[in-house]
Image (spheres, rainbow, N blue to C red):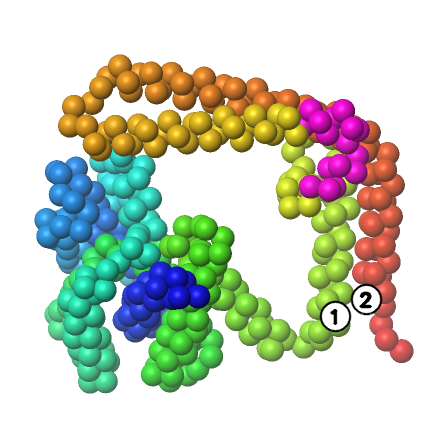
Amino acid sequence: MTELTELLAVPFFVCVVLIGVHCQFGLHVLKKNVVFVDLALAQCASLGATVAFMQGHLPQSVGAYSWSLGFALSAALMLSLVRFAPAKIPAEALVGVLYIVSAAAAILLIERAPQGAEHLKQILTGSVLTVDISDLYGVVALYMVIGTILALATTKQWMQVGGTKGWIADLCFYSAFGLVVTSSVAIAGVLLVFSFLIIPALIGLLLAQKAITQWIYGVVLGCIAALLGLLASYWLDASTGATIVCAFGLLLALFLLGYLFRKSSVSTGKLLKMTLIGMLLAIAISLAWLAANPRADQPLFDSAERYVPVLRSAYFTKDEEVMYQDAKKYVARYTAELNRLGEMEVRNRYENTETDDFLVQKISSFQQSYNEMIKGETFVMREVRSRARERLRWPAIIFSLVLGLSCGALIQKGLRPRK
């Protein structure tokens, strides 16, 4: 427990700080109906970070931050001019164009970098798990100042103006937002920053009417989602940023379902019955597809076998089971060797000032060989499974008909008027 607390305490504090300031901005973004402005600003900031990376600046250096902030403020200037666009052009469309252009430019630059894929992953998911508490002092102070000014501007309605004053207000808002996003992307990455901005604000809008109450609900529930995401990433040994984003998405889905359920007249029994019918129909369709083409991909069947391997053993013969498991072991062994070679190549690039071309070619040759061997063993696994599934055609036809008729009876019963 002590190890868990020491590992996750600082990342959780980082999440609390980021959720607090981004939820405040998120409520304004939703009100302005420019939902993807955060993604556009974050992507422009990451484009600046990519330019700095190509010039040799370290990710957390002053040079990288300066480039990133410069691109974010330039994007803020362009976003503030959106208000002068023709009325028939949606503002969200222009925001989307800014995002895709900056994303494409970043990809063009990353393609020329030796470790471009790692840099792209760093930009998207961040490194919230490795943040040091000393790195947060300046960020927390900056967020407190900007958050206070934004709250004062909201109270005084400084942003509810038009004309030139409205443009200046938008420019100040987007510039402050760009400053926040630049600092946040360097810590948490593009995906996590967008989640912190939009999802807590959406939950707040679902639960309250007043802005301050919406912000409180968003921050509290967002912190709970962040904590669950951190714990899940620890227990599952998964990417922290991506896991937290999924936790936020799941929380929003639950609140939306609860809201729809509360507003609708559907009873709990009817909802469960509809869910059961949907599951039975999905299984019936999957069995019908298995009967029609047993050698094709079977999404539902494959997923069930992945998590419940005993299903495969139920229709495999003893020889097929041995052959399948043997090929699976070779795939795992070759994959481990492939990962080891990849790590060796990364170390060689970072630790040696002069790249050994012969060693790089040798590693590449081994990687190609292992990839071919993995493809061969995977083909064996797929062929054994396909032949075994061909014997399931008639049972699949029978079960799909039974399930289909059962669904039809349940639907007919549900549509029958009550006396």
Q: Which residue is mark 2?
A: 414
In the picture shown, does residue 148 fall above or below 11?
A: below
Please report contact status of discs 2 and 1: CB closer than 8 Å, yes or no. yes
Q: Residue drawn 22% across and 19% down?
A: 356
Which quarter of the figure is the C terminus placed in?
Answer: bottom right
Q: Looking at the image, tell me whether mark 2 or mark 1 is earlier in sequence order.
A: 1
Q: Is residue 416 above or below residue 155?
A: above
Marks 2/1: CA–CA distance: 9 Å
- Classify mark 2: helix, strand or loop: helix
Give the residue number, with chain letter if any, for mark 1: 270
Mark 2, residues whose alpha carbon is within 10 Å: few (<14), some, or many (≥20)? few
- The N terminus lies in quadrant: bottom left
Residue at 33 percent of width and 56 percent of height = 129
Please tell me which residue is depicted at 73% across the width and 29% down the height of the picture.
321
What's the residue type where badge 1 is placed?
Answer: Lys
Tell me the residue at 30%/42% (across/down). Answer: 120
User: Can you give x and y, in whole percent of width and height, for residue 203 in the image?
Assistant: 44, 72
Q: Would residue 246 appear left or right of 241 to someone viewing this image?
A: right
Q: Quadrant of residue 400?
A: top right
| Residue 212 colored in magenta in the image | no
SS assignment at label 1: helix
Which quarter of the figure has residue 358? top left
Residue furthest to the front in view is 2
Q: Quadrant of residue 10?
A: bottom left
Confirm whether residue 222 shows in the render.
no
Residue 212 spot, x, y in % from top left: 34, 83
Determine whether, in the image, residue 125 is placed left or right of residue 382.
left
In the picture shown, does residue 233 fall above or below 32? above
Q: Which residues are magenta?
A: 309-324
